[in-house]
Amino acid sequence: MTDHSLPASADIRLEGVSKSFDGKVKAVDDVSLAIAPGEFFSLLGPSGCGKTTSLRMIAGFEAPDAGRIRVGGADITDVPVHKRDMGMVFQSYALFPHRTVAENVAFGLRMRSLPREEIRRRVAAALKQVALDGYEDRRPGQLSGGQQQRVALARAIVIRPPVLLCDEPLGALDRKLRQSMQFELKQLQKELGVTLVFVTHDQEEALAMSDRIAVMNAGRVEQVGAPAEIYDRPRTRFVADFIGEINLFDGTWDGGRFIAGDGRSLPATMNGARPGAGAVAVRPEKARIVAPGEGAVAGRIESANFLGGQVLYRIAASGDRHMLAKETNMGAAARPVGTEVGLLWNEADAVVLEG
Amino acid sequence: MASLADALPATRLTPRPRRPAVSPIAWLVGPALLLFVIFFVLPFAVMAVLSLLSGNPAQNPNVYLTSRHYVRFAGDDLYWDALWSTLRIGIVTTLASLLVGYPLAHWMARMKSRLGHALLLMAVIAPMLTGIVVRTFAWMTILQDKGVINTTLIGLGLIEKPLPLMYNEFGTVVALVHIYVPFMVLTLTGVIGRIDERLEQAARNLGASRLRAFAEVTLPLSLPGIFAGSLLVFALSISAYVTPFLMGGTNVLTLPMLIYQQVSSSFNLGFAGALGVILLAVSLLVVIAYNHVLARFSGPEGLT
Ligand SMILES: Nc1ncnc2c1ncn2[C@@H]1O[C@H](COP(=O)(O)OP(=O)(O)OP(=O)(O)O)[C@@H](O)[C@H]1O
Ligand SMILES: [Mg+2]
């Protein structure tokens, strides 16, 4: 693709957007987001939290009940779908089964009434970009899932949209293919410079690919931040729990110290937390396994899960509690089940949660 | 709703691995095959044979082979007119049913509310529970010179003489469309319902207006349903007897009416057979031509 300049990517702003269906539950509840031009932005959350609905409102398939949506500064809330000029990759790809791969990719260009020759050239270039040259005359039904996914991608990017919307585009692929497609999609997005809104319920995928992530829960945005920030500094209990594994401790802040339910003081710094009831959380890989007497909490190793590069220990503590600790796999030095151990972490590694 | 289109060869079959022995399923097809032979192949064969004989072999053993029934048909404009009239009624009825039925089927197939869907389905099917004769008589009371429409228009002073709404092909087609449109709707609803709505959304996202998205995606994908529904309505309306007889009066003469005459009053089974064979042959040609037209619309692989 040397015959044109990069498409101007646009920023997307959602301002207090709400949507409910049948006047009942709010599928999307007062969501505000500012997505930068050229950003890889993920909407992450459990099933039914309103990710697809948010995306469909940006695409124009659903009209928000309240709030405005702006793209590139222009208010597009009332612009009809076909005038929004956005690329979209549907969850099930939605390829036209009665048309060939080339015809599928050419569709958006044809709708823009471009000259035949230019359509041909751009379709060829787009198919090349997704490594599908030579498949022009196949029908979608004759392609594998991964190939269909790429056709859907080519069909969306060939119109050079300033904004690309993807609804779980890799959801139907097997793990291996999924990982290579993650890499390719990210690569392509950077190459095109397009603003990409990516919907997924797979936290690993979101962490691996995104510039920033919005974690959603029950129609609301819980936290927006870079992957490392979301992982290392979850603000709410929901985010901490949803992303990866974590040890949660309920307790109270008392004179700058965190006192767990059983009366022990745990390593944590208050930085900004309100005094009174609170919670802290520690990632399993931040928890060090030490001798029973030296830990902030103590317990007995109940099981050891071999994860390849690491071992995940499940530790039974007093009061029917369980904790997780992850250690680098050291071969023969693995700890046997039944060992009494203690857990310790740096004060800075204990995440202070709101409420 | 298992659609009638399922049964048609229009749907492409995926090749299955060949089995060594006769599958037990094949035995289940047996009764259907037997019925097909007894009620379709056999009568047609008898009809075709009779059409080539000089008389009824059951009554007169000295019959001989002859083409005179076909020669008789070819030599008389009355019969050609009846053939054209039959085809014209069939084609116009089919196209009108398609125009009326498609929007209805589309609406039904895309309806979110299950209650609404059920009510519409009832509305479509309910008329089929009344006999054809009853429905035709109902149309007579509406379309007659002294029927609802004409008396209303005259009463309002909009016309002076009654409009010729009945005892012609127009009245015949109106009644036939009413009677056969449910077949079109049911067939199309099944096919349209299975077209993923997201395809049309994808088209709109790529810059197609609602109408364009429909024309580019849903319409071509529903061609098998259009073909199946049309075939059904066409076959039913060219073989209709009661409705053309009652609605057409003396002004409409179709092949089924002629055939009935030949069988019931002229006792000329040979000529009746020839008329039947001609009707079947010509309607097959029409169907093949129609299939070609639709296939052109949907591209090389769209239909067959
Ligand atoms: N067309 C609709 N009619 C009624 N309710 C809907 C509709 N679309 C979505 N909902 C409801 O809105 C809520 C959010 O749905 P949405 O599809 O946005 O979730 P999601 O985050 O994409 O979930 P998933 O990960 O399962 O795709 C759900 O409770 C869903 O049932
Ligand atoms: Mg979804």
Image (cartoon, grey):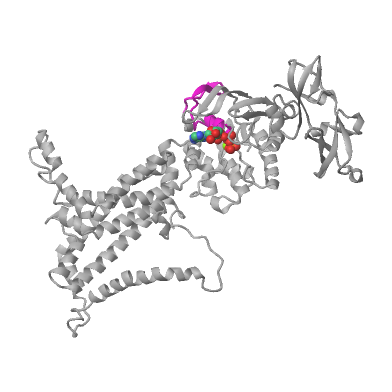
Q: Depth check: give the residue in front, B9 or B156.
A: B156
In the picture shown, does residue B204 fall above or below B95? above
**Residue A43 position by quadrant:** top right
Quarter of the picture holding the N terminus of chain A:
top right
**Residue B256 position by quadrant:** bottom left
Q: Residue at x 49, y 33 (%)?
A: A61
Left or right placement of residue B105 versus residue B237 in this view: right
Q: Is residue A138 shown to the viewer in this render?
A: no
Q: Which residue is drawn at 22% across and 71% down?
A: B273
Left or right placement of residue A337 versus residue B46 in this view: right
Q: Depth check: give the residue in front, B41 or B86.
A: B41
Residue B4, image x, y percentages: 39, 56
| Ligand 1 visible in quadrant | top right
Left or right placement of residue B274 versus residue A189 in this view: left
Quarter of the picture holding the C terminus of chain A:
top right
Task: Verify whether residue A69 appears in magenta.
Answer: yes
Residue B18, image x, y percentages: 55, 69
Task: Verify whether residue B5 appears in magenta.
Answer: no
Residue B150, image x, y percentages: 12, 41
Residue A56, image x, y percentages: 53, 32
Left or right placement of residue A342 versus residue B10 in this view: right
Residue ranking furthest to the bottom: B62
Q: Is residue A9 shown to the viewer in this render?
A: yes
The residue stretch that appears in magenta: A50-79
